[in-house]
Image (cartoon, rainbow, N blue to C red):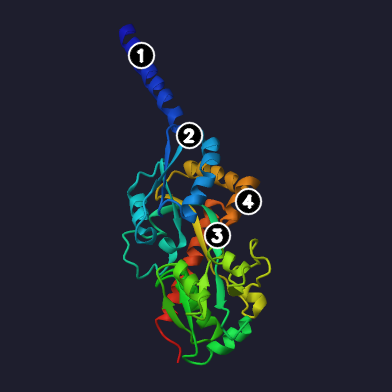
């Protein structure tokens, strides 16, 4: 009996020792490097934002954060990779509104942003500008709306079909009751070139793309689509101030993880990124890119994504039925 008791005791102690070894590693997340998938190429605004917060987050978590760029299909490729990753907090992603909310009901992607990911926090948001060529007759938003209510009178150039710039222009037509023809370009740089040259009368641009041309007097900024005036262009009125109440449209980036991420891991990641975004030096660097930091709790970010999907899906559906 004594021998049996000794064996049983040894087994219990061994099991406890094994548990004691495993348990701390579970509680000590993270205990190895974290991969951050950025769904756009190096050098862009999303990649720059990721690198701005990278070292602060590393200091918060005590582990390296390794950035891996996985561009393609406007961010869809990177999110498909993220969806397949283990939900352990060691692979996370930075994605934008285009791949998460734009035309989500009809887009051919293998993921559902509401089902397949765990939102961590927003990172940065940037509004859009309605800009005009110097040769355009209108100088105010009311002028633009008056011109646009005449069928075939003018057009708005934007950065590509299905993008948020496109949907912002669609929403403008819907809310203002205008009939502008919407012309897609391959990105905002060629839109800026043609607005500057007077080849198109109006264009949807973002502040970083348009600011230098606005400051130089090469194009006019009619209104900005943020809820409040934007820090790097404080003299440009919001759409609401200029006469179109309730108009708001922003592009944004946020941190996502695969579905099934443990709540305590999500909480640690959220705390690290939010602390970075609230650091004044980091916030200033993000603003210098033309974006506004958007720290949120995971729950707030999930609610925000849901509201953005609902808004832009409604705009897409209304655009499919042209006004009479």
Left or right for 231, reference 2: right
Left or right for 275, reference 158: right
Using the rendered image of the protein, determine whether residue 69 is visible from the camera's viewpoint. Answer: yes
Name the residue beneath numbered marker 1: 10
Q: Secondary structure at mark 4?
A: helix
Place of residue 253 in the rendered image (x, y in percent of width and height, measured from the top left): 49, 57
Closer to us: 201 or 66: 201
Name the residue beneath numbered marker 2: 63
| 229 w.r.t. 138: above or below | above
> Earlier along the polypeptide chain: callout 2 or callout 4?
2
Place of residue 28 in the rendered image (x, y in percent of width and height, measured from the top left): 48, 31
> Earlier along the polypeptide chain: callout 4 or callout 1?
1
| 101 w.r.t. 6: above or below | below
Name the residue beneath numbered marker 3: 125
| 35 w.r.t. 233: above or below | above
Place of residue 158 in the rendered image (x, y in percent of width and height, measured from the top left): 46, 73
CA separation in Å, label 4 and label 3 = 13 Å
Indicate which label's residue lies in the foreground, 2 or 4. 4
> Earlier along the polypeptide chain: callout 1 or callout 2?
1
State the residue at coordinates (51%, 82%).
173
Name the residue beneath numbered marker 4: 284
> Earlier along the polypeptide chain: callout 4 or callout 3?
3
Q: Secondary structure at mark 3?
A: strand
Indicate which label's residue lies in the foreground, 4 or 1. 4
CA separation in Å, label 3 and label 1 = 59 Å
> Earlier along the polypeptide chain: callout 3 or callout 1?
1
- Position of the N terminus by quadrant: top left
- How dense is the environment of label 4, judged by Cα within 10 Å: few (below 14), some, or many (20 and up)? some
CA separation in Å, label 1 and label 2 = 36 Å
Residues at circles 3 and 2 in contact by the CB criterion of under 8 Å = no
């Amino acid at each position: 009996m004594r021998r049996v008791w000794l064996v049983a005791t040894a087994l219990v102690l061994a099991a406890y020792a094994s548990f004691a070894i495993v348990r701390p590693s579970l509680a000590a997340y993270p205990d190895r490097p974290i991969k951050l998938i950025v769904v756009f190429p190096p050098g862009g605004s999303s990649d720059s934002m990721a690198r701005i917060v990278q070292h602060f987050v590393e200091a918060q978590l005590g582990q390296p954060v390794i950035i891996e760029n996985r561009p393609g299909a406007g961010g869809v490729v990177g999110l498909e990779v993220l969806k397949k990753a283990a939900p352990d907090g060691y692979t996370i992603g930075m994605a934008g509104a285009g791949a998460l909310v734009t035309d989500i009901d009809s887009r051919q992607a293998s993921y559902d942003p509401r089902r397949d990911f765990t939102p961590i926090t927003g990172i940065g948001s940037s509004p859009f500008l309605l800009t005009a060529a110097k040769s355009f007759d209108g100088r105010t938003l009311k002028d633009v709306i008056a011109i646009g209510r005449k069928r075939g009178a003018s057009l708005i150039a934007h950065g590509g079909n299905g993008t948020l710039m496109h949907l912002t222009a669609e929403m403008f037509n819907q809310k203002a009751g205008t009939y502008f023809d919407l012309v897609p370009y391959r990105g905002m740089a060629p839109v800026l070139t043609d607005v500057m040259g007077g080849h198109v009368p109006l264009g949807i641009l973002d502040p970083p793309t348009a600011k230098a041309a606005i400051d130089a007097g090469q194009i006019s900024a009619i209104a900005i689509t943020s809820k409040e005036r934007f820090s790097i262009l404080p003299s440009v009125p919001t759409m609401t101030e200029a006469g179109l109440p309730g108009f708001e449209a922003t592009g944004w980036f946020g941190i996502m993880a695969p579905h099934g991420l443990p709540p305590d891991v999500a909480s640690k990641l959220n705390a690290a990124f939010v602390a970075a975004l609230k650091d004044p030096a980091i916030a200033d660097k993000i603003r210098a890119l033309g974006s506004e930091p958007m720290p949120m709790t995971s729950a707030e970010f999930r609610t925000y994504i849901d509201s953005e999907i609902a808004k832009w899906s409604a705009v897409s559906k209304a655009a499919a039925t042209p006004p009479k």
